[in-house]
Image (cartoon, rainbow, N blue to C red):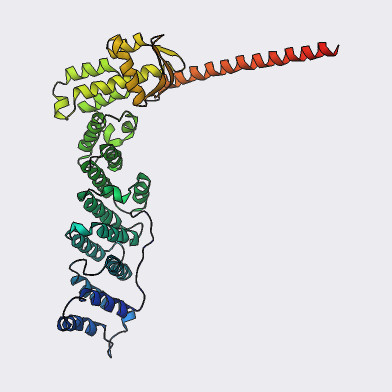
Amino acid sequence: MAGTDSVSVFAEGTFEEQIQELVNYIVRNRSEEERAAFIRPFQEALKKSEGRKSLEDDVERKRNIFKMVVVEVKGLGDGGEKEIEGFFNLLFSHLYSLYASDGPETKDYVNAFIQLLIVEPATQKFLKYRILSNLFNATEHTSSIRPLVYSSLVQISSANGDLDVLQITRTNVEKWLSEWTVPPTEKASFLKTISGAYEAESQPEISYEYERLYVQTLPATSPGAQESAIDLIATALRLPNVFDFDPLFKLDAVISAKDHELFSLLQIFLSDGLQEFNVWVDSHPDALNKHKLDRSRLEHKIRLLTLASLAFQYVGRNLPYSKVAEALQVDLAEVEKWAIDVIRAQLVWGKLSQTTHSLYVTRATARTFEKEQWEALQKRLLAWKSGLNGILDVVVNAKRLAGLGETQDVA
């Protein structure tokens, strides 16, 4: 939802006709007497009279009439879903034709509409999602009201366990953030709302992606930036399928937390191994409990990363099980289990051989790409070039010999 910008707005007719349509919808199920009494003030407000400006030229009068209508909107009403959606589309159309898209009055009206939808029964939840999506799409791309509307849509759908209905994509979110004329702190707050919603729906890895965007957007000097950075580090370490820690070192808020104990642990997971991890844990006895980190799970993750780094040095070669056992500090009998785990984690690709007691590595993930990794890549490319030159020499010699044979036949 809210992925496009086309909204069906039932707004045919003059201003007077449209207001009458809205009013008639509000009172449709009341008695004849109640309807007449309710409609009368609107008829008076719309009436043409001497000395009064034409309604088309009197914006203030239009605003007052619109306010009269909105005050009487107490809920979704008694129509069918299409009628209700059309009713709100018409309200939104008048709102944006009468007020600036970023004006304080507009924000007040939008807040009122959102609160009205929040209290409506969950039985009409999908209709509420459509109405809020229409409001979002009707709002100018740059407006500061857009994050307010979409945050509410996220919160309402998440409360009903329907977050996936919105089909939120990171591409759309980043596009919206680039368009909105709001301070970085408001953009960060929007991202935190999305991250929290995914966390509440037990989708921690998607939550982590938006948490990372949140910390990236948050100014490093803003209040709470360091705390948010530490929370992000802890989340990255905690999640079993997060192995790429390099992007965190590109975030200003994370770098600003370099004196924190978890920052040094993050550095170990970026480029060090099991031995450094154990030293860190021994020197920070209370840190794991404080940050809700499980030592056994962290040990499992650091072993996989250690094996990935080792395998990176053996791409195109056999990695002996004895080397793996030594690096991971495990028995030789356990090596195959760890090799299978690292392949399942898509950190290493290769083939196990029980005959040679080795892992033939075809591909491995580099945890970070610095001087050591560039040098390894250079050696690999040179070996590849040398291999190609050898093949080329064989081909040239074969052609030369074939040419000599043809010459002898002719003679």
Q: Residue 384 appears in which quarter of the rendering?
A: top right
Look at the image and tell me in which quarter the C terminus lies. Answer: top right
Name the residue rendered at 34%, 48% in the picture.
173
Name the residue rendered at 21%, 19% in the picture.
280
Q: What residue occupies the far bottom of the structure in this picture?
A: 50
Q: Is residue 399 left or right of residue 189?
A: right
Q: What residue occupies the far right of the structure in this picture?
A: 411
Looking at the image, which is closer to me, 85 or 195? 85
Q: Residue 219 appears in which quarter of the rendering?
A: top left
Q: Does residue 271 appear in this view?
A: no
Look at the image and tell me in which quarter the N terminus lies. Answer: bottom left
Q: Does residue 359 appear in this view?
A: yes
Q: Residue 136, how many percent across, how many down?
A: 31, 58
Query: What count of labels does the image hold?
Result: 0
Name the residue rendered at 27%, 17% in the picture.
274
Q: Residue 90, how many percent across, how many down?
A: 30, 70
Looking at the image, which is closer to me, 407 or 114? 407
Q: Residue 342, how many percent across, how many down?
A: 34, 22
Image height check: is 397 above or below 373? above
Q: Residue 291 appears in which quarter of the rendering?
A: top left
Image height check: is 25 above or below 323? below
Q: Residue 27, how many percent across, how many down?
A: 20, 76
Q: Is residue 299 left or right of residue 311?
A: left
Name the residue rendered at 22%, 85% in the picture.
44
